Image (spheres, grey):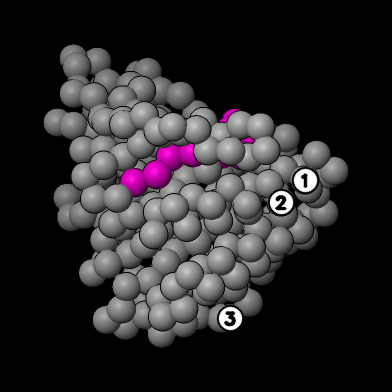
Amino acid sequence: MLDVLQAAAVAAGKAILDVYHAGPEVSYKADCSPVTDADESAEKIILDRLAAAFPDIPVVAEEAVAAGHIPDIEGKSFFLVDPLDGTKEFVGRNDDFTVNIALIENGEPVAGVVYAPALGILYAATRNKAKKSVVSGQHDIGPPTIIGCRSRGDTLVALASRSHNSQETIAYLTEHGITDYESIGSSLKFCLLAEGLADIYPRLSRTMEWDTAAGDAVLRAAGGETVTMDGSPLAYGKRNQISDADFANPHFVSRGKS
């Protein structure tokens, strides 16, 4: 399965880079978030490939959900897809955007791929194994390197969202005595934790499941965790929520090893 997910992400990434270099056409969804022709073309590539390889596994994809297309996932494993995570980074000509594909089983991200096409870096994970590859040339995936979270030292290095930081996040860092933090776009924050380059990523602003699932899969496979503010593991497949929309996440903290 992971080979299919990686190939789909890289193919989508090629289409995204074509638009990136030509200059994207930007429109706005009902929630005022931007969407480009790259989002839509990349999602089609991924959906076509997943349907061909895994016709019985439903797919929850960001742009399809925005258009009102939500499959029945009750009691089923399913894919979560964000064809272009970090659209604001993409539009702003910042290379921190990614393609995200994750497999969810029993509310847990058990496999995932995060591909940063402008950086030529691909992260992939199955249970208990996370890896990083360089993608070069004609979008060829190089040999993988196994990655893992680092143990925490006396001083923690935090990551924060570049485009969606919040005063609540800054207050959390201050409360926990964390003064060293870097702002990064998209799901790369999970991957940097998984790679042992930082220790903690508090997210006290809104996200959706497709924003987090693939990166969270990489992080968990690398020995880290993502928990809500009450300490429970962040769950996936959230429908009919009283306080928020389908697939919306509560605030959470992602972190490496204790």
Span of residues in magenta: 116-125
Q: Which residue is mark 2?
A: 15
- The answer to whether residue 162 of the structure is visible from this angle is no
Q: Which mark is residue 68?
A: 3
Q: Is the residue marked by circle 3 packed among few (<14), some (14-19), or many (20+) residues within 10 Å? A: few
Residue 253 picture location, percent across and down: 29, 43
Residue 161 picture location, percent across and down: 49, 37
- Residue 120: within the magenta? yes
Q: Secondary structure at mark 1?
A: helix
**Reading the chain from its start, which is encountered first: label 2 or label 3?**
2
Q: Is the residue marked by circle 1 packed among few (<14), some (14-19), or many (20+) residues within 10 Å? A: few
Q: Secondary structure at mark 2?
A: helix
Q: Secondary structure at mark 3?
A: loop
Q: How many angstroms separate mark 2 from mark 3 (CA)? A: 24 Å
User: With 130 as the anchor, is 16 left or right in this view?
Assistant: right
Image quarter of the C terminus: top left
Q: Residue at x 23, y 69 (%)?
A: 106
Q: Amino acid at mark 3?
A: Gly
Q: Amino acid at mark 2?
A: Ala
Q: Which mark is residue 18?
A: 1
- Residue 101: within the magenta? no
